[in-house]
Amino acid sequence: MNHQKSTTSGDDETDYFDAIHVDLFTAKILSKLPVKSIAQCRCVSKLWSSQIRRPYYNMLFPIMSPAPPRILFTIENAEGLFFYSSPQPRNPDENTSLVATLHHRTSGNNLRITSPPVGGLLCLEHDRKNYSRVLVISNPITGEFLALPKLRINEIKKELLYLNETYIFGYDPIDKQSKVLRITSSSCRLPKFGQYHVLTFESGNKNLLWRKTECCTLHFPMGDIRAMCISGILYYAADVSTNFTIACFHVRGCRETSMVKAYLPIA
């Protein structure tokens, strides 16, 4: 570590270490505080306020949480959807019993989960009485729902009357945004048809729009899709020229990155 020297009087010299960087010192203090106190600390000074508001602050200096993380799970039956959560065991090897808390439930079987949850949110399809379907984003803890706008495709030809609509939910951990990938396709009739759209979901933003994105390879999601979102990449089973593949879609860049051929049957 570097040293600095300071002369106080005559030939006497005093050694001292470099001063601790104020940003690191402040961040160390803030990381020990609960969430409510962090919000109040923004009023202490401009320095503290700017540091707390940094986009990557929570990643660099995680805030201590008074409650342990919880596991969210859903039970689906003829009566509806039941959303529960339970404390995540600190030691999975211990034989402990966990108590699940029911947060919210729906009635009827008109809601269907389209893909696995991400970021604590769910993407659902709502079947209405007039046989139309509406896509909704749900917070299963609070029971809040947000209906997403419909998408109309003008390029559909008359011979392409039967179309498949597939929705896959993903999360961008860098920009902290949830996104829905919609794939509109028709693979059972010629000519084959496929279009890809992305909707970015942000809290408080009511101006939600679908925007078209291009994929380098025409592909069709398999019927019983099992999608996974890992580190901002969506992985899902797809059919490309009668070959089973794993499609990889970059959530942040809104683009297909690669197609991985699956040599083994996808269970």
Image (tube, helix red, strand yellow):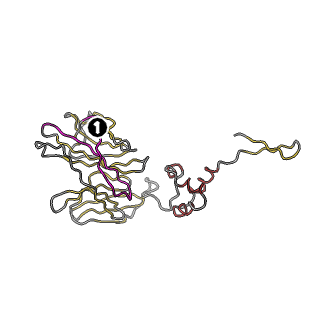
User: Which residue lies at the image location 25% right of the left edge and 46% below the top edge?
Assistant: 225
**On-image quarter of the C terminus:** top left
Q: Residue furthest left?
A: 159
Lateral position of residue 31 relative to residue 77, left or right: right
Q: Nearer the viewer, residue 119 or 92?
A: 119
User: Which residue lies at the image location 42% right of the left edge and 50% below the top edge?
Assistant: 176
Q: Position of residue 116 (x, y in %)?
A: 31, 51
Residue 199 shown in magenta:
yes
Instruction: Say what amino acid the circle numbered 1 marks.
Output: Cys
Please provide the residue range marked out in magenta. 190-217
User: Which residue lies at the image location 24% right of the left edge and 66% below the top edge?
Assistant: 107
**Vertical arrangement, residue 141 with respect to residue 215, above or below:** below
Occupied quadrant, residue 156 = top left
* Residue indicated by mark 1: 215
Q: Secondary structure at mark 1?
A: loop
Q: Position of residue 195 (x, y in %)?
A: 23, 42
